[in-house]
Amino acid sequence: SDYRYSITDVDTDNIAIFTELDNNFGAWNVKLGLRYDDTTITPSSKQQSNEYNALSANVFSTYDVTSNLKFFGGLGKASRVPDARELYFYSVANLKGEDATQQKKQIEVGTPDLDQTTNYEVDLGMENRYESFTLKTKLFYSVLKDYIYYNSSKKPGTTTTEPIFIQNSFENIDATIYGLEISGSYYALDNLYADFGIAYQRGEKDTLTTNQTDTNLAEIPPLKGNVALNYVYYQESIATVEFVGADTWKNYDAENGEQELNSWGIMNLKVDHKLPYGFGLAAGVDNVFDKTYAVSNTYKDLTLLMDTVGDNVMLMNEPGRYYYVNANYSF
């Protein structure tokens, strides 16, 4: 039977043509790109085949105001076709039959008629460079049309003559993602410098998923930052102390399995030591104080690990204190 597998054999054929232009006009640098894609997705099961066509384009430009100040900006349009899992995935669940007994049923979780997602994005920023200090600031705003989203509230229906139940948990919605990124370096001495960065994003549903009211987009992490102090010694060897942390995960999609996660902060240590004749040795300790923390939430889209009661996705914490040693050779 075609329904013995979670996903039957699926062929994805893509043909694309693209062109790119990169040119300088005085203090301006302009990059242009254009691409056309034709994609056909064909399952070996009885489910429908799909064909997608997309024209993508982007323009990115930088302007050097002075040797210390540069502005940049870009506009782009790009598309992503649904993958085989989103289109054709099957699951098996225990459902109550007419006699109230539990029976294993094949459920069509994928949605075979999904549209491709199209992203329209604008990026703006500036870069400052001085003798002992660099700073880069970037703003972005992204509009997602037909964004492919998992809706965990959809239940198996019985309106089919096939020996399976239809759930079609993936659907197309419109959404918006916007954010800010700041990064830079400070050179205190010739052999001592610091790197730093901070990133913040927000994601919102412009159209709600079926029978749901939560406007928070899943998988949008909270405010995150890092600071690294680097000491350069023998033949450009580097010793690093790094601090990484994130704010409480407050904006989450509870209706699709996400939950509030605590803020966290960890320290990492690393030494990248250069040896003669092209050899090198790197050693370090991640999460020095053995903190318990998680960087990914429990969105039910990819349910690799489930608990034994209900269908809750397990929260996966990051590793505890971790030691490593690597050797390398370059020539």
Image (cartoon, rainbow, N blue to C red):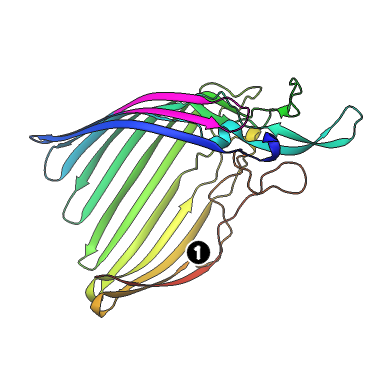
* Residue 73 image position (x, y, % from top left): 25, 33
Q: Which residues are magenta?
A: 36-57
Instruction: Pick the residue in front: 292 or 209.
Output: 209
**Percent from the top left, x then y, of residue 102?**
86, 37
Q: Secondary structure at mark 1?
A: loop
Q: Main secondary structure of the magenta part?
A: strand
Q: Kindly give the residue lying farthest to the bottom in the view shown.
A: 276
- Write the residue at 49% across / 50% down: 246
- Seen from the viewer's position, the closer of residues 313 and 140 is 313
| x and y, in percent, of residue 116 in the image | 47, 26
Task: Say how many tags the image has.
Answer: 1
Q: Is residue 106 above or below residue 233?
A: above
Q: Residue at x 43, y 41 (%)?
A: 200
Is 266 left, or right, of 226 in this rendering? right
Outermost residue toward the left in this view:
26
Q: Amino acid at mark 1?
A: Asn
Q: Position of residue 330 (x, y in %)?
A: 27, 70
In the rendered image, residue 306 lying in the magenta stretch gets the answer no
For residue 118, side relative to residue 94 (left or right): left
Is residue 91 depicted above or below 111 in this figure? below
Is the C terminus in the top left, top right, bottom left or bottom right quadrant?
Answer: bottom left
Q: Which residue is mark 1?
A: 287
| Residue 210 visible to the viewer | yes
Query: The N terminus is located in which quarter?
Result: top right
